Image (cartoon, rainbow, N blue to C red):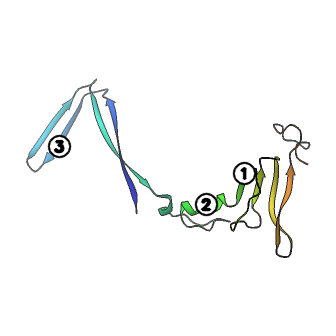
């Protein structure tokens, strides 16, 4: 699986004395580090690529990797001030129009004709969600 290698070094202050024993082909080494000392600890971090991490398709997400699943989600829900267009639009997609504060659903209005239909229009104080906020 492709990944990006990364290392990080952290400085640690010891709270107690630590003894390390290392066995090599040339013998055994015993090291003693006393409390209050600082040591550098190197960590290896592997970063995996989202396109290489597999997922199980679920509901409207048919992608089999995380990158594809994120892209499918982004193609189903829009939050922008202009009307979404393009080849990825499908019936049931949602669009929140930030310019008008209206919520729309993309649906078939007549055979083979799809349009953005408003399903909620914000009025009054949007900080309070009640029967008077959306009409």
Residue 44, x across and y down, in percent: 34, 47
Whichever of labels 1 and 3 marks the residue nearer the N terminus, that label is 3
Taking the image as shown, residue 45 lies to the left or right of residue 97, namely: left
Q: Residue at x 59, y 67 (%)?
A: 63
Q: Residue at x 34, y 43 (%)?
A: 43
Taking the image as shown, residue 5 lies to the left or right of residue 18, namely: right
Q: Name the residue under label 2.
A: 71
Q: Residue 97: give its label.
A: none
Q: Residue 22: give its label.
A: 3
Whichever of labels 1 and 2 marks the residue nearer the N terminus, that label is 2
Whichever of labels 2 and 3 marks the residue nearer the N terminus, that label is 3
Q: Which of marks 2 and 3 is in front?
A: 2
The Cα atoms of the two marked residues, 1 and 2, are separated by: 15 Å
* Nearer to us in this view, 84 or 91: 84
Relative to 13, residue 7 above or below: below
**Mark 1 closeness class: few <14, some 14–19, many ≥20 residues within 10 Å:** some
Q: Name the residue under label 1.
A: 79
Residue 28, x across and y down, in percent: 11, 43
Q: What element carries label 3?
A: strand
């Amino acid at each position: 699986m492709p990944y990006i290698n990364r290392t990080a070094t952290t400085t640690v202050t010891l709270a107690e004395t630590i003894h390390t024993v290392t066995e090599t082909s040339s013998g055994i080494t015993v090291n003693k580090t006393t409390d209050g000392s600082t040591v550098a600890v190197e960590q290896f971090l592997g970063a995996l690529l989202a396109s290489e991490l597999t997922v199980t398709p679920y509901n409207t997400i048919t992608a089999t990797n995380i990158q594809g699943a994120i892209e499918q989600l982004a193609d189903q829900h829009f939050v922008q001030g202009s009307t979404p267009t393009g080849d990825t639009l499908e019936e049931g997609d949602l669009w929140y129009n930030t310019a008008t504060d209206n919520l729309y659903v993309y649906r078939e209005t007549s055979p083979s004709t799809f349009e953005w239909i408003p399903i909620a229009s914000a009025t009054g104080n949007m900080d309070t969600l009640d029967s008077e906020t959306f009409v």
